[in-house]
Amino acid sequence: MFNFSIAFELIEKEIQLMPLGTFPQELYEPIRYLMDLGGKRIRPLLVLIGHHLFANDWQRCVQPALAVEIFHNFTLMHDDIMDKAPLRRGKPTVHEQWNSNIALLSGDVMLVRAYQQLDLLDDTYFRVIIKKFHQCAVEVCEGQQFDMNFEKLAWVSEVDYINMIRLKTAVLLGFSLEFGAIVGGASADNAQKLYDFGVNIGIGFQLKDDLLDVYSDQAKFGKQVGGDIIANKKTFLLIKALENAKGQLKQDLNDWLAQTEFDKEEKVKAVMKIYDALDIKQITENKMNQYFDKAFAALEEIKIPLERKKVLVDFTNELLNREK
C-alpha cells in the first residue's frame, strides 16, 4: 500500500543522492541550494499517487518522478528573477544569494537534468510521457508569459486570469498525476480524468495561494505577505476588486495602484481594507471551491476501489487546509 511518509522520504533521499557536477562551483551550488530549501514535493508525490491508483509497485516511479520536481524548481528559479522576488521558502532567492546570470544558467542546467530523469523511464512509456511533458512545459512557459503580460495591462478579465493560472501552475499538477497513471497502466480515459482532476485542483490551489498572500501569517507563509499587493500583481483578488469597486472605494484602489512611491505596509493594509469592504475573500473562496468540486467530480468517474482513491483524497484535503 501507499505510505506518504515513506514516499516523501524516498523522494528526499533521491534528491540528496542526485548527482550534480562540481565545477564550475557557481553553476551547481545554486541548484543544490534551491533543491535543499525543501517544500512539500507535491508534484513527485502526485506522480507516485497517480501510479498507486492503478498499480502496486509505485516505488519504481520515484526516480522518474524527480523530473517534475526538478522542472518545477527550474521554473521557480527563473520566475523569481522575473518577479524580483527576495524570498523563496523563507530564504533568499537564488538571484539574491548569487546573481541573475548565475540563476539563469543554473536554471537551464536544471531543465536538462529534468530530461535526464525522464530518460530513466521504461521504453514502453517513454515516448508518450515525453510528448506530454513537452506540451506541459510549453504551456507552463505560456502561462508565465501571460502573467508578465498582465503586468502591463490596466485590466485583466477573470477568464484570462484563470487560463493563465491553469497554464502556469495547474497543468503541471495534472501532468504529474497523468504521468503516474500512465506508468501504472491506466486506460487513456482514466489517465485523462486524473489529469482533469489535477488541473482543477491546481487552479483551486493557486486561488488559495492568492488568498494566502494577503491573509496569511508571514512566519507561516515563507514569502513576503502582501507581496502581490505591493507589486500590483493581477491576482484573482485584485481583478474582482477592480470589477466590483464603485465610488470612493474604486478611487482609493486606483490611487494606490497608480502610486510609485509608498510605504509598503501602509499600502497592504489600505488595499486589504478595500478587499474586506468588497467581500473579496469570500468571493475568492467561492470560486476556489467551484474548481475543487469539479476536480472531485472527475475523480468520482474513475472506476477504481475507493481505498485507492482515498490516498489522493486525503493528500488533497491536507493541501486544501494548509496555511502556507
Image (cartoon, grey):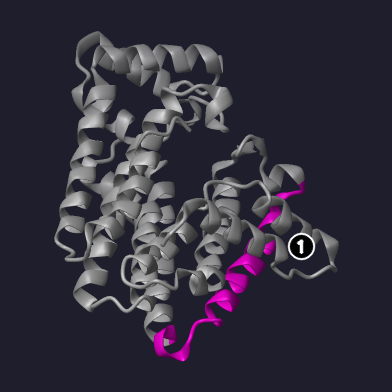
- Image spot of residue 200 (x, y percent): 26, 51
Q: Main secondary structure of the magenta part?
A: helix
**Is residue 41 shown above or below 230?**
below
Chain part drawn in magenta: 98-126
Let me know if residue 130 appears in the view: yes
Q: How many numbered dots are placed on residues in this image?
A: 1
- Which residue position holds label 1? 28
| Percent position of residue 271, x then y | 39, 17
27 and 306: which one is in front?
306
The structure residue drawn at horizontal position 52% and vertical position 53%, both measured from the top left corner, is: 41
Determine if the magenta segment contains residue 110.
yes
| Camera-side residue of 182 and 254 | 182
Amino acid tagged 1: Tyr
User: Where does residue 137 sit, x and y in percent of width and height?
Assistant: 44, 67
Q: Is mark 1 on a helix, strand or loop?
A: helix
Tell me if I can see residue 139 in this picture: no
* 54 to the left or right of 44: left
Q: Residue furthest top?
A: 248
Which residue is pictured at 34% across the width and 18% down the height? 253
- Relative to residue 34, is residue 262 depicted above or below? above
Bin the neighbour count of mark 1 within 10 Å (Cα to Cα): few under 14, some 14-19, many 20 and up. some
Check if residue 313 falls in the magenta segment.
no
- Residue 146, above or below 83: below
Residue occupying the far bottom of the picture: 123
